[in-house]
Image (spheres, helix red, strand yellow):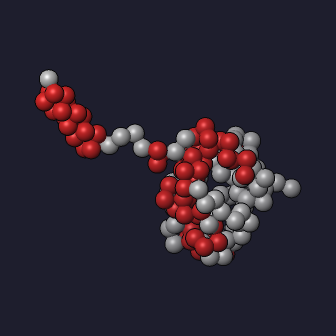
Amino acid sequence: MKILCVMLFAGLFAVFAIWGLPSRAAGDAGNGQDLFRLCNACHEIGPDARNRVGPILNNIVGRRAATRSGYSYSAGMREAGSEGFVWTVENLDGYIENPRAFLRGTKMAFSGMADAEQRQDLIAYLKTLKFDDAPNSRTFR
């Protein structure tokens, strides 16, 4: 019986080693929604969002940098976008950690988020922000 238990444990270990355990790296969108309060002073989201101090963040994950219409991006951000820079999960993580160190010339005033787990939660939430872009190009006045 002892050998059977050891074999079962070894088999389960092998399965998890091959397919992996559920990863915390994917982030918790619910926690990310709470963390977004740090962002919403400058950024809007949702179907009626407007560009403010920062651009609308709808559909940010996978979008090329500096492509939100109606927003005045910094020269550094425009250059990154023109060179094909895309907001991948990895790029968002680096940018949110320390915007000025990650992208020289950014005008984002946020100093950064040191906690990697919080960044992953925030990015998980940003991944849920899928809205039609058509009405979202209005500029805040």
Which residue is found at the position 55% from the left and 41% from the top?
Answer: 28
Q: Residue 40's spot in the image, x, y percent? A: 75, 50
Q: Relative to residue 44, is residue 29 drawn left or right?
A: left
37 to 91, vertically: above or below: above
Q: Tell whether 61 sits left or right of 110.
A: left
Marks counted in the figure total: 0
The image shows residue 134, relative to residue 81, as above or below, that is above
Q: Is residue 130 visible?
A: no
In front of the other: 22 or 56:
22
Residue 52 left/right relative to 134: right
Q: Quadrant of the C terminus?
A: bottom right
Residue at the right extreme?
Answer: 141
Considering every residue shown, the one lying at the far front of the view is 2
Between 114 and 141, the residue placed more toward the observer is 114
Horizontal and vertical percent for residue 73?
Answer: 69, 67
* x, y percent for residue 24: 46, 44
Q: Quadrant of residue 82?
A: bottom right
Split into 4 quadrants, where in the image is the N terminus?
Answer: top left
- Which of the two residues, 11 or 118, is positioned nearer the viewer here? 11
Left or right, residue 114 beside residue 19: right
Q: Quadrant of residue 77?
A: bottom right
Q: Position of residue 123 (x, y in %)?
A: 56, 50
Residue at left offset 74%, top offset 41%: 48
Say if residue 24 shows up in the picture.
yes
Give above or below for 97 relative to 130: below
| Residue visible at 18% across and 33% down in the picture | 6
At x 68% / y 47%, what residue is drawn?
Answer: 36
Q: Is residue 81 positioned above or below 115 on the image?
A: below
Occupied quadrant, residue 16: top left
